[in-house]
Image (cartoon, rainbow, N blue to C red):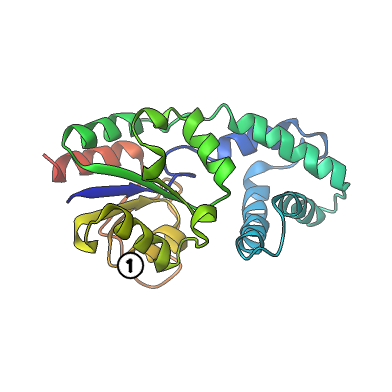
Amino acid sequence: MRTIAFDLDDTLYDRTEPLKQTFASFTPTKELRFNEILPIYHKYSDIAFEKVTNQQWTLEESYVYRIRKTLQEQNIGISEQDALAFQAMYTKNQDRIQLRPHIEEIIQYLQNKEIQTIIITNGPSTNQRRKVRHLGLEAYLSANEIIVSEEEGVAKPDVAIFKVAEKRFGFAKNEVWYVGDSFPMDIIGASQAGWKAIWLNPSRQEPVINSNPAEKTVYSTEALKEYLFQIIY
């Protein structure tokens, strides 16, 4: 093993926490049950992300769409202005994100063992790099070691974004492992690229296909640490 690549959102930090805070603070959504609304929000968020990736929508249009469509399913209507206010609250809450337990220890261990550490993340460049900064990851990774889908014009699970990393850092597919939380984006994407994958699955999701191509599935960052420390010594 020469390199380990990590996903960012919901892998290195818990993306649901700032979103949960926002739903709890935003007047039209205060009474909603977060666990019930979250998968609906993610559904429309995925649709909006694809539109932005294909340059069909602006980021602002995607922000308005995902929260308005989510609330429409709850028979709640909000204006475009209110939708942007929700996004502003969400962005502010994202600025207080923290690494999941054990993640910093894992990165330090990998770098002490001279294992290159990189990030491959889907999303807008400004947003993703702001998260990296607030998580304190700039202390461990250079800007070049963070691959952002918007900057490359291609997003996971497309094999092409994994090829970007291979070309940039000069490693072979059998020299790299990928750690991510999303089965369709991270695990299937990395596996199709010929990379070994570790599925960080704290919510204990079921695979969206009959087989699980991950080399290892772990259900906590503590278990991830134990596994990596076991295979890298």
Classify the position of the C terminus by image quarter: top left
Q: Which amino acid does label 1 sit on?
A: Ala
Q: In which quarter of the image is residue 184?
A: bottom left
Label tally:
1
Q: Residues within 10 Å of mark 1 (few under 14, many from 20)?
A: some
Q: Residue 177: x, y in percent?
A: 26, 54
Which image quadrant is residue 34 in?
A: top right
Q: Is mark 1 on a helix, strand or loop?
A: loop
Which residue is found at the position 72% from the left and 53% from the top? 66
Q: Name the residue under label 1.
A: 193
Q: In which quarter of the image is residue 163?
A: bottom left
In the shown orientation, is residue 46 left or right of residue 121? right
179, 153: nearer the viewer: 153
Q: In this view, does 134 lie above or below 49?
A: above
Q: Position of residue 223 (x, y in %)?
A: 28, 41
Residue shown at 36%/44% (left/top)? 145
Does residue 31 appear in the picture of this structure?
no
List x then y, in percent, for residue 95.
59, 29
Name which residue lies at 58% across and 41% down.
127
Horizontal relation, residue 48 to residue 69: left or right: left
Q: Which of 93 and 165 is in front in this view?
A: 165
Residue at x 79% of width, y 52% of height = 68
Q: Which residue lies furthest to the bottom in this view?
A: 210
Is residue 118 among what the camera can see?
yes
The residue nearer to you, when weighing 120 against 212, is 120
- Residue 83 appears at what percent x and percent y? 80, 44
